[in-house]
Protein backbone atom coordinates (compact mmCIF):
# COMPACT_ATOMS: atom_id res chain seq x y z
CA UNK A 1 0.00 0.00 0.00
CA UNK A 2 2.94 2.35 0.57
CA UNK A 3 3.39 2.47 -3.20
CA UNK A 4 0.35 4.78 -3.28
CA UNK A 5 1.98 7.38 -1.04
CA UNK A 6 3.39 10.32 -2.94
CA UNK A 7 7.04 10.59 -1.99
CA UNK A 8 10.60 10.32 -3.23
CA UNK A 9 10.22 6.68 -4.21
CA UNK A 10 6.96 7.05 -6.12
CA UNK A 11 7.69 10.11 -8.25
CA UNK A 12 7.54 8.07 -11.46
CA UNK A 13 4.20 6.49 -10.58
CA UNK A 14 2.84 9.93 -9.67
CA UNK A 15 3.92 11.23 -13.08
CA UNK A 16 2.25 8.31 -14.87
CA UNK A 17 -0.99 8.40 -12.87
CA UNK A 18 -1.50 12.11 -13.17
CA UNK A 19 -0.59 12.10 -16.87
CA UNK A 20 -3.11 9.32 -17.42
CA UNK A 21 -5.79 11.42 -15.70
CA UNK A 22 -4.81 14.54 -17.64
CA UNK A 23 -4.97 12.58 -20.93
CA UNK A 24 -8.51 11.40 -20.13
CA UNK A 25 -9.74 14.88 -19.32
CA UNK A 26 -7.99 16.35 -22.37
CA UNK A 27 -9.61 13.74 -24.63
CA UNK A 28 -12.96 14.48 -23.05
CA UNK A 29 -12.63 18.23 -23.52
CA UNK A 30 -11.58 17.76 -27.14
CA UNK A 31 -14.60 15.63 -28.01
CA UNK A 32 -17.39 17.15 -25.92
CA UNK A 33 -19.99 18.46 -28.33
CA UNK A 34 -22.65 19.41 -25.77
CA UNK A 35 -22.43 20.82 -22.25
CA UNK A 36 -24.32 17.80 -20.90
CA UNK A 37 -25.56 14.39 -21.97
CA UNK A 38 -28.94 15.00 -20.37
CA UNK A 39 -28.68 11.92 -18.15
CA UNK A 40 -31.32 11.65 -15.44
CA UNK A 41 -30.77 10.99 -11.74
CA UNK A 42 -32.64 7.70 -12.09
CA UNK A 43 -30.32 6.54 -14.83
CA UNK A 44 -27.09 7.60 -13.14
CA UNK A 45 -27.74 6.78 -9.48
CA UNK A 46 -27.77 2.94 -9.90
CA UNK A 47 -24.36 3.06 -11.60
CA UNK A 48 -22.90 4.78 -8.55
CA UNK A 49 -24.95 2.73 -6.08
CA UNK A 50 -23.66 -0.57 -7.40
CA UNK A 51 -20.04 0.28 -6.75
CA UNK A 52 -18.74 -1.45 -3.65
CA UNK A 53 -16.33 0.92 -1.95
CA UNK A 54 -14.94 -1.97 0.06
CA UNK A 55 -13.79 -3.70 -3.16
CA UNK A 56 -11.02 -1.45 -4.52
CA UNK A 57 -9.75 -1.89 -8.07
CA UNK A 58 -6.10 -1.29 -7.04
CA UNK A 59 -5.19 0.02 -10.47
CA UNK A 60 -5.65 3.69 -11.42
CA UNK A 61 -6.30 2.89 -15.08
CA UNK A 62 -9.25 0.73 -14.06
CA UNK A 63 -10.40 3.44 -11.66
CA UNK A 64 -10.27 6.01 -14.45
CA UNK A 65 -12.27 3.68 -16.72
CA UNK A 66 -14.90 3.43 -14.00
CA UNK A 67 -14.81 7.20 -13.47
CA UNK A 68 -15.61 7.69 -17.14
CA UNK A 69 -18.78 5.72 -16.55
CA UNK A 70 -19.95 7.33 -13.32
CA UNK A 71 -18.79 10.91 -13.79
CA UNK A 72 -16.78 12.12 -16.77
CA UNK A 73 -19.17 11.02 -19.53
CA UNK A 74 -22.15 12.79 -17.96
CA UNK A 75 -20.54 15.71 -16.16
CA UNK A 76 -21.71 19.27 -16.78
CA UNK A 77 -19.01 20.94 -18.86
CA UNK A 78 -18.69 24.66 -18.18
CA UNK A 79 -16.13 25.16 -20.95
CA UNK A 80 -18.76 24.42 -23.61
CA UNK A 81 -19.96 27.62 -25.34
CA UNK A 82 -23.59 26.65 -24.80
CA UNK A 83 -23.27 26.28 -21.05
CA UNK A 84 -25.12 29.47 -20.09
CA UNK A 85 -26.38 28.41 -16.66
CA UNK A 86 -25.04 29.53 -13.33
CA UNK A 87 -22.07 31.69 -12.36
CA UNK A 88 -19.49 29.11 -13.43
CA UNK A 89 -16.63 30.18 -15.62
CA UNK A 90 -14.44 28.16 -17.92
CA UNK A 91 -11.04 27.92 -16.23
CA UNK A 92 -7.67 29.12 -17.48
CA UNK A 93 -4.91 26.56 -17.92
CA UNK A 94 -2.31 28.26 -15.65
CA UNK A 95 -4.82 28.02 -12.79
CA UNK A 96 -5.45 24.32 -13.46
CA UNK A 97 -1.70 23.79 -13.39
CA UNK A 98 -1.62 25.64 -10.07
CA UNK A 99 -4.37 23.32 -8.78
CA UNK A 100 -2.27 20.27 -9.67
CA UNK A 101 0.78 21.69 -7.93
CA UNK A 102 -1.05 22.81 -4.81
CA UNK A 103 -2.75 19.47 -4.22
CA UNK A 104 0.48 17.52 -4.71
CA UNK A 105 2.57 19.71 -2.39
CA UNK A 106 -0.50 20.06 -0.15
CA UNK A 107 0.58 23.08 1.88
CA UNK A 108 -1.86 24.22 4.51
CA UNK A 109 -2.20 27.96 4.76
CA UNK A 110 -3.14 28.19 8.40
CA UNK A 111 0.40 28.63 9.66
CA UNK A 112 3.80 29.63 8.40
CA UNK A 113 5.23 26.31 9.57
CA UNK A 114 2.87 24.44 7.22
CA UNK A 115 3.28 26.63 4.16
CA UNK A 116 6.29 28.99 4.21
CA UNK A 117 6.30 30.64 0.74
CA UNK A 118 2.61 29.77 0.33
CA UNK A 119 1.73 32.23 3.10
CA UNK A 120 3.82 34.98 1.51
CA UNK A 121 2.30 34.34 -1.92
CA UNK A 122 -1.21 34.53 -0.48
CA UNK A 123 -0.34 37.76 1.34
CA UNK A 124 1.04 39.29 -1.83
CA UNK A 125 -2.14 38.42 -3.75
CA UNK A 126 -4.26 39.91 -0.98
CA UNK A 127 -2.20 43.12 -1.20
CA UNK A 128 -2.54 43.08 -4.98
CA UNK A 129 -6.31 42.80 -4.69
CA UNK A 130 -6.69 45.50 -2.03
CA UNK A 131 -4.56 47.82 -4.19
CA UNK A 132 -6.76 47.13 -7.22
CA UNK A 133 -9.80 47.97 -5.09
CA UNK A 134 -8.09 51.02 -3.57
CA UNK A 135 -8.72 50.13 0.07
CA UNK A 136 -5.69 52.04 1.34
CA UNK A 137 -2.47 51.24 3.21
CA UNK A 138 -4.03 49.57 6.27
CA UNK A 139 -5.96 47.03 4.22
CA UNK A 140 -5.67 43.27 4.53
CA UNK A 141 -7.71 40.12 3.95
CA UNK A 142 -7.60 36.40 3.53
CA UNK A 143 -8.57 33.75 0.99
CA UNK A 144 -11.81 31.89 1.71
CA UNK A 145 -13.79 28.98 0.29
CA UNK A 146 -16.25 31.20 -1.57
CA UNK A 147 -18.50 34.24 -1.56
CA UNK A 148 -20.76 32.77 1.09
CA UNK A 149 -17.88 32.45 3.54
CA UNK A 150 -16.47 35.85 2.58
CA UNK A 151 -19.83 37.51 3.22
CA UNK A 152 -20.17 35.68 6.54
CA UNK A 153 -16.74 36.78 7.72
CA UNK A 154 -17.32 40.39 6.62
CA UNK A 155 -20.60 40.51 8.51
CA UNK A 156 -18.99 38.92 11.57
CA UNK A 157 -16.48 41.79 11.63
CA UNK A 158 -19.29 44.31 11.11
CA UNK A 159 -21.20 42.80 14.02
CA UNK A 160 -18.16 42.99 16.29
CA UNK A 161 -17.53 46.63 15.30
CA UNK A 162 -21.19 47.63 15.81
CA UNK A 163 -22.12 49.98 18.61
CA UNK A 164 -24.11 47.49 20.67
CA UNK A 165 -23.73 44.00 22.14
CA UNK A 166 -27.47 43.42 22.00
CA UNK A 167 -27.81 41.26 18.93
CA UNK A 168 -31.57 41.80 18.63
CA UNK A 169 -30.96 45.51 18.02
CA UNK A 170 -28.74 45.00 14.99
CA UNK A 171 -29.95 45.59 11.46
CA UNK A 172 -28.30 44.80 8.09
CA UNK A 173 -29.50 46.55 4.94
CA UNK A 174 -29.30 44.78 1.59
CA UNK A 175 -31.22 45.05 -1.64
CA UNK A 176 -34.10 42.72 -2.35
CA UNK A 177 -31.95 41.02 -5.02
CA UNK A 178 -28.83 40.59 -2.86
CA UNK A 179 -27.41 37.09 -2.41
CA UNK A 180 -29.15 34.80 0.08
CA UNK A 181 -25.86 34.31 1.94
CA UNK A 182 -26.54 37.69 3.60
CA UNK A 183 -29.63 36.28 5.33
CA UNK A 184 -27.86 33.01 6.07
CA UNK A 185 -24.97 34.93 7.65
CA UNK A 186 -27.39 36.93 9.81
CA UNK A 187 -28.82 33.68 11.11
CA UNK A 188 -25.38 32.18 11.75
CA UNK A 189 -24.35 35.36 13.56
CA UNK A 190 -27.27 35.00 15.95
CA UNK A 191 -29.17 38.05 14.74
CA UNK A 192 -32.94 38.19 14.91
CA UNK A 193 -35.41 37.06 12.23
CA UNK A 194 -35.93 40.67 11.11
CA UNK A 195 -32.26 41.57 11.11
CA UNK A 196 -31.94 41.90 7.33
CA UNK A 197 -33.91 44.86 6.01
CA UNK A 198 -34.72 44.37 2.34
CA UNK A 199 -34.27 47.54 0.29
CA UNK A 200 -36.25 47.81 -2.96
CA UNK A 201 -34.46 48.10 -6.30
CA UNK A 202 -35.07 50.43 -9.20
CA UNK A 203 -35.95 49.52 -12.78
CA UNK A 204 -32.34 48.46 -13.38
CA UNK A 205 -32.33 46.22 -10.28
CA UNK A 206 -30.04 48.58 -8.35
CA UNK A 207 -30.64 49.41 -4.70
CA UNK A 208 -32.81 52.53 -4.30
CA UNK A 209 -30.70 54.79 -2.13
CA UNK A 210 -33.67 56.99 -1.21
CA UNK A 211 -35.30 53.92 0.30
CA UNK A 212 -32.01 52.98 2.00
CA UNK A 213 -31.76 56.45 3.57
CA UNK A 214 -35.36 56.19 4.78
CA UNK A 215 -34.74 52.77 6.36
CA UNK A 216 -31.51 53.90 8.03
CA UNK A 217 -33.37 56.86 9.56
CA UNK A 218 -36.21 54.62 10.69
CA UNK A 219 -33.70 52.24 12.26
CA UNK A 220 -32.25 55.04 14.36
CA UNK A 221 -35.67 56.42 15.28
CA UNK A 222 -36.67 52.95 16.49
CA UNK A 223 -33.61 52.87 18.76
CA UNK A 224 -32.02 50.11 16.69
CA UNK A 225 -28.44 49.91 15.44
CA UNK A 226 -27.50 49.88 11.74
CA UNK A 227 -24.80 47.19 11.74
CA UNK A 228 -23.97 47.31 8.06
CA UNK A 229 -25.09 47.90 4.52
CA UNK A 230 -24.40 45.20 1.94
CA UNK A 231 -24.04 46.74 -1.50
CA UNK A 232 -23.94 44.20 -4.31
CA UNK A 233 -21.53 44.80 -7.18
CA UNK A 234 -22.99 42.29 -9.60
CA UNK A 235 -26.23 40.73 -8.42
CA UNK A 236 -26.51 37.01 -9.04
CA UNK A 237 -29.53 37.26 -11.32
CA UNK A 238 -29.13 40.57 -13.12
CA UNK A 239 -25.47 41.50 -12.74
CA UNK A 240 -26.72 44.89 -11.55
CA UNK A 241 -24.35 47.06 -9.55
CA UNK A 242 -25.73 49.03 -6.63
CA UNK A 243 -24.87 52.77 -6.62
CA UNK A 244 -21.70 52.42 -4.56
CA UNK A 245 -20.76 56.13 -4.11
CA UNK A 246 -24.23 57.07 -2.82
CA UNK A 247 -24.29 54.04 -0.51
CA UNK A 248 -20.82 54.97 0.78
CA UNK A 249 -22.11 58.49 1.60
CA UNK A 250 -25.02 57.06 3.58
CA UNK A 251 -22.78 54.61 5.44
CA UNK A 252 -20.53 57.49 6.46
CA UNK A 253 -23.48 59.64 7.50
CA UNK A 254 -24.97 56.87 9.68
CA UNK A 255 -21.62 55.52 10.92
CA UNK A 256 -22.35 52.14 9.41
CA UNK A 257 -20.08 49.42 8.05
CA UNK A 258 -20.15 49.21 4.25
CA UNK A 259 -19.68 45.75 2.78
CA UNK A 260 -19.48 45.33 -0.99
CA UNK A 261 -20.38 41.88 -2.24
CA UNK A 262 -18.39 41.87 -5.48
CA UNK A 263 -18.39 38.06 -5.74
CA UNK A 264 -19.44 38.41 -9.37
CA UNK A 265 -18.46 41.98 -10.30
CA UNK A 266 -14.85 41.62 -9.13
CA UNK A 267 -13.82 40.82 -12.70
CA UNK A 268 -14.17 44.56 -13.31
CA UNK A 269 -11.10 45.07 -11.10
CA UNK A 270 -9.03 43.66 -13.97
CA UNK A 271 -11.13 45.13 -16.77
CA UNK A 272 -9.38 47.32 -19.32
CA UNK A 273 -12.55 49.17 -20.35
CA UNK A 274 -15.22 48.89 -17.65
CA UNK A 275 -13.38 49.43 -14.34
CA UNK A 276 -15.41 52.62 -13.74
CA UNK A 277 -18.57 50.55 -13.31
CA UNK A 278 -17.49 49.69 -9.78
CA UNK A 279 -16.21 53.10 -8.78
CA UNK A 280 -16.99 53.64 -5.12
CA UNK A 281 -15.88 50.14 -4.10
CA UNK A 282 -12.73 51.76 -2.67
CA UNK A 283 -14.87 53.29 0.08
CA UNK A 284 -15.95 49.91 1.46
CA UNK A 285 -15.01 48.61 4.91
CA UNK A 286 -15.00 45.08 3.50
CA UNK A 287 -15.27 43.46 0.09
CA UNK A 288 -16.04 39.95 -1.15
CA UNK A 289 -14.35 38.82 -4.36
CA UNK A 290 -14.86 35.43 -6.01
CA UNK A 291 -11.98 34.76 -8.34
CA UNK A 292 -13.81 31.53 -9.19
CA UNK A 293 -16.57 33.54 -10.84
CA UNK A 294 -15.01 36.25 -12.95
CA UNK A 295 -11.25 35.62 -12.82
CA UNK A 296 -11.62 32.26 -14.64
CA UNK A 297 -10.31 30.29 -11.65
CA UNK A 298 -11.29 26.76 -10.61
CA UNK A 299 -13.48 26.40 -7.52
CA UNK A 300 -12.55 27.36 -4.78
CA UNK A 301 -10.91 30.73 -5.02
CA UNK A 302 -12.34 33.66 -3.11
CA UNK A 303 -11.25 36.32 -0.65
CA UNK A 304 -12.56 38.76 1.91
CA UNK A 305 -10.73 42.08 2.03
CA UNK A 306 -10.94 44.75 4.73
CA UNK A 307 -10.00 48.43 4.86
CA UNK A 308 -8.59 48.11 8.38
CA UNK A 309 -6.44 45.05 9.06
CA UNK A 310 -7.08 45.45 12.79
CA UNK A 311 -10.72 44.40 12.33
CA UNK A 312 -9.56 40.91 11.39
CA UNK A 313 -8.67 40.40 15.07
CA UNK A 314 -12.31 39.43 15.61
CA UNK A 315 -11.47 36.13 13.90
CA UNK A 316 -8.30 35.58 15.93
CA UNK A 317 -7.99 32.74 18.42
CA UNK A 318 -4.75 31.29 19.70
CA UNK A 319 -3.89 27.66 20.37
CA UNK A 320 -0.68 26.63 22.01
CA UNK A 321 -0.20 23.79 19.52
CA UNK A 322 -0.65 25.95 16.44
CA UNK A 323 -0.37 29.72 16.67
CA UNK A 324 0.56 30.73 20.21
CA UNK A 325 0.29 34.41 21.03
CA UNK A 326 4.07 34.79 21.25
CA UNK A 327 4.30 34.16 17.49
CA UNK A 328 2.60 37.51 16.92
CA UNK A 329 5.47 39.25 18.77
CA UNK A 330 7.95 37.16 16.83
CA UNK A 331 6.24 38.48 13.66
CA UNK A 332 5.59 34.97 12.33
CA UNK A 333 2.85 35.27 9.73
CA UNK A 334 0.07 32.81 10.59
CA UNK A 335 -2.88 33.33 8.28
CA UNK A 336 -5.12 31.34 10.64
CA UNK A 337 -5.14 34.47 12.81
CA UNK A 338 -7.34 36.09 10.12
CA UNK A 339 -9.41 33.17 8.92
CA UNK A 340 -12.58 31.32 9.91
CA UNK A 341 -10.92 28.12 8.70
CA UNK A 342 -7.95 26.32 10.23
CA UNK A 343 -6.50 23.81 7.75
CA UNK A 344 -6.87 25.66 4.45
CA UNK A 345 -6.03 25.00 0.82
CA UNK A 346 -3.41 27.05 -0.99
CA UNK A 347 -6.03 28.28 -3.48
CA UNK A 348 -4.07 31.49 -3.93
CA UNK A 349 -1.52 29.58 -6.01
CA UNK A 350 -3.99 29.32 -8.89
CA UNK A 351 -4.36 33.09 -9.10
CA UNK A 352 -0.61 33.48 -8.76
CA UNK A 353 0.05 31.16 -11.73
CA UNK A 354 -2.62 33.01 -13.69
CA UNK A 355 -1.23 36.48 -13.04
CA UNK A 356 2.36 35.36 -13.65
CA UNK A 357 1.38 33.73 -16.96
CA UNK A 358 -1.35 35.94 -18.41
CA UNK A 359 -1.19 39.09 -16.34
CA UNK A 360 -4.22 40.91 -14.95
CA UNK A 361 -4.88 42.48 -18.34
CA UNK A 362 -5.32 39.01 -19.81
CA UNK A 363 -8.07 38.25 -17.29
CA UNK A 364 -9.59 41.71 -17.77
CA UNK A 365 -9.67 41.21 -21.53
CA UNK A 366 -11.58 37.92 -21.16
CA UNK A 367 -14.06 39.52 -18.76
CA UNK A 368 -14.54 42.49 -21.09
CA UNK A 369 -15.29 40.04 -23.90
CA UNK A 370 -18.13 38.41 -21.97
CA UNK A 371 -19.53 41.84 -21.04
CA UNK A 372 -19.47 42.76 -24.76
CA UNK A 373 -21.14 39.49 -25.64
CA UNK A 374 -23.90 40.23 -23.11
CA UNK A 375 -24.45 43.66 -24.68
CA UNK A 376 -24.78 42.07 -28.16
CA UNK A 377 -27.00 39.31 -26.85
CA UNK A 378 -29.24 41.90 -25.19
CA UNK A 379 -29.70 43.65 -28.54
CA UNK A 380 -30.55 40.32 -30.14
CA UNK A 381 -33.18 39.40 -27.54
CA UNK A 382 -34.61 42.93 -27.29
CA UNK A 383 -35.19 42.91 -31.06
CA UNK A 384 -36.80 39.46 -31.03
CA UNK A 385 -40.61 39.69 -30.63
CA UNK A 386 -40.70 36.16 -29.17
CA UNK A 387 -38.95 37.34 -26.00
CA UNK A 388 -39.18 39.90 -23.22
CA UNK A 389 -35.82 40.84 -21.68
CA UNK A 390 -35.67 42.42 -18.21
CA UNK A 391 -32.66 44.74 -17.88
CA UNK A 392 -29.82 45.96 -20.04
CA UNK A 393 -26.75 44.11 -18.66
CA UNK A 394 -24.16 45.88 -16.49
CA UNK A 395 -22.09 42.68 -16.47
CA UNK A 396 -22.85 39.46 -18.30
CA UNK A 397 -26.27 38.08 -17.36
CA UNK A 398 -29.54 38.36 -19.23
CA UNK A 399 -32.95 37.58 -17.77
CA UNK A 400 -35.70 37.06 -20.32
CA UNK A 401 -38.86 35.15 -21.02
CA UNK A 402 -40.51 33.58 -24.01
CA UNK A 403 -43.77 35.41 -24.73
CA UNK A 404 -45.87 33.74 -27.42
CA UNK A 405 -48.07 36.20 -29.32
CA UNK A 406 -51.11 33.94 -29.17
CA UNK A 407 -51.07 33.26 -25.40
CA UNK A 408 -52.09 35.85 -22.82
CA UNK A 409 -52.43 33.70 -19.67
CA UNK A 410 -49.27 34.51 -17.66
CA UNK A 411 -49.42 31.17 -15.83
CA UNK A 412 -49.43 29.30 -19.13
CA UNK A 413 -46.45 31.40 -20.24
CA UNK A 414 -44.72 30.50 -16.95
CA UNK A 415 -45.27 26.82 -17.64
CA UNK A 416 -43.99 27.12 -21.20
CA UNK A 417 -40.76 28.77 -19.98
CA UNK A 418 -40.28 26.22 -17.20
CA UNK A 419 -40.84 23.43 -19.70
CA UNK A 420 -38.37 24.93 -22.17
CA UNK A 421 -35.64 25.11 -19.52
CA UNK A 422 -36.22 21.51 -18.44
CA UNK A 423 -36.43 20.19 -22.01
CA UNK A 424 -33.25 21.98 -22.94
CA UNK A 425 -31.45 20.49 -19.92
CA UNK A 426 -32.76 17.02 -20.77
CA UNK A 427 -31.52 17.37 -24.34
CA UNK A 428 -28.09 18.53 -23.15
CA UNK A 429 -27.91 20.85 -26.17
CA UNK A 430 -27.53 23.89 -23.91
CA UNK A 431 -27.95 24.77 -20.26
CA UNK A 432 -29.70 27.94 -19.14
CA UNK A 433 -30.73 29.08 -15.68
CA UNK A 434 -34.02 30.44 -14.44
CA UNK A 435 -35.37 32.85 -11.86
CA UNK A 436 -38.53 34.70 -10.89
CA UNK A 437 -39.21 38.35 -11.62
CA UNK A 438 -42.37 39.92 -10.22
CA UNK A 439 -43.64 36.45 -9.33
CA UNK A 440 -43.29 35.18 -12.93
CA UNK A 441 -40.88 32.58 -14.25
CA UNK A 442 -38.01 33.86 -16.38
CA UNK A 443 -34.99 32.29 -18.02
CA UNK A 444 -31.42 33.44 -17.53
CA UNK A 445 -28.22 33.38 -19.53
CA UNK A 446 -25.08 33.79 -17.43
CA UNK A 447 -22.36 34.56 -19.96
CA UNK A 448 -18.90 33.85 -18.61
CA UNK A 449 -17.38 32.07 -21.58
CA UNK A 450 -15.52 34.24 -24.11
CA UNK A 451 -15.86 31.34 -26.58
CA UNK A 452 -19.64 31.78 -26.69
CA UNK A 453 -20.62 33.63 -29.86
CA UNK A 454 -23.72 35.64 -30.73
CA UNK A 455 -24.59 32.74 -33.06
CA UNK A 456 -24.72 30.40 -30.03
CA UNK A 457 -27.11 32.81 -28.33
CA UNK A 458 -29.32 32.94 -31.43
CA UNK A 459 -29.32 29.14 -31.70
CA UNK A 460 -30.21 28.66 -28.03
CA UNK A 461 -33.04 31.20 -28.31
CA UNK A 462 -34.43 29.16 -31.22
CA UNK A 463 -34.15 25.96 -29.18
CA UNK A 464 -36.00 27.62 -26.27
CA UNK A 465 -38.74 28.91 -28.53
CA UNK A 466 -39.04 25.46 -30.15
CA UNK A 467 -39.45 23.69 -26.80
CA UNK A 468 -41.90 26.31 -25.52
CA UNK A 469 -43.97 26.08 -28.71
CA UNK A 470 -44.02 22.32 -28.45
CA UNK A 471 -45.32 22.59 -24.88
CA UNK A 472 -48.02 25.08 -25.87
CA UNK A 473 -49.04 22.95 -28.84
CA UNK A 474 -49.38 19.87 -26.63
CA UNK A 475 -51.20 21.90 -24.03
CA UNK A 476 -53.76 23.01 -26.67
CA UNK A 477 -54.18 19.37 -27.73
CA UNK A 478 -54.79 18.38 -24.12
CA UNK A 479 -57.43 21.09 -23.72
CA UNK A 480 -59.36 20.16 -26.91
C1 LIG B 1 -23.47 38.15 -5.51
C2 LIG B 1 -23.07 36.83 -4.91
N1 LIG B 1 -22.60 36.79 -3.66
C3 LIG B 1 -22.23 35.65 -3.07
C4 LIG B 1 -22.35 34.45 -3.73
C5 LIG B 1 -21.94 33.18 -3.05
O1 LIG B 1 -20.72 32.75 -3.54
P1 LIG B 1 -20.21 31.24 -3.41
O2 LIG B 1 -21.14 30.41 -4.26
O3 LIG B 1 -18.83 31.29 -3.93
O4 LIG B 1 -20.29 30.86 -1.97
C6 LIG B 1 -22.83 34.44 -5.03
C7 LIG B 1 -22.97 33.15 -5.75
O5 LIG B 1 -23.50 33.08 -6.82
C8 LIG B 1 -23.19 35.65 -5.65
O6 LIG B 1 -23.68 35.69 -6.89
Image: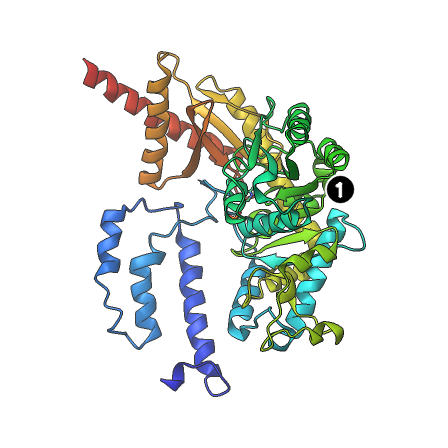
Closer-to-camera residue (427/153)? 153
Q: Is 128 located above or below residue 464 in the figure? A: below
Judged left or right of residue 57, residue 275 is: right
Q: Position of residue 196 (x, y in %)?
A: 56, 36
On screen, residue 189 versus residue 118, left or right, reads left
Q: Position of residue 478 (x, y in %)?
A: 19, 19
Give the position of the C terminus as an image quadrant.
top left
Residue 467's place in the image compared with 108, above or below, is above
Residue sitting nearer the eye, 141 or 73: 141
Q: Number of marks in the image?
A: 1
Is residue 354 visible in the rendered structure shown here?
Answer: no
Q: Residue at x 30, y 71 (%)?
A: 62
- Mark 1 highlights which residue? 283
* Residue at the right extreme of this rendering: 137
Hey, which quadrant is residue 346 in on the image?
Answer: bottom right
Query: Residue 104 placed where, x, y %?
Result: 51, 73
Find residue 205 and report its image quarter: top right
Regarding mark 1 in the picture, which secondary structure is present there?
helix
* Residue 415 in sight: yes
Amino acid sequence: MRSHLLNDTTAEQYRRSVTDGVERVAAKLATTDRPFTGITVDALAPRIDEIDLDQPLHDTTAVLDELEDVYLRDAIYFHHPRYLGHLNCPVVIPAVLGEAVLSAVNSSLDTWDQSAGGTLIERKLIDWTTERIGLGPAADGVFTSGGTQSNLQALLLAREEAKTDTLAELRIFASEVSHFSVKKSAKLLGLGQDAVVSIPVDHDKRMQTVALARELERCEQDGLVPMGVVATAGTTDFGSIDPLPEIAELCEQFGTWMHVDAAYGCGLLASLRHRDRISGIERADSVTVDYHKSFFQPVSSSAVLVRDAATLRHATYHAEYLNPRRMVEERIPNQVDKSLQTTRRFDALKLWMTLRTMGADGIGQLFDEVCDLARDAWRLIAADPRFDVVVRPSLSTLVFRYIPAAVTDPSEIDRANLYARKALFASGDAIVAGTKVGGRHYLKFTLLNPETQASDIAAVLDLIAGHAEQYLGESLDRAS
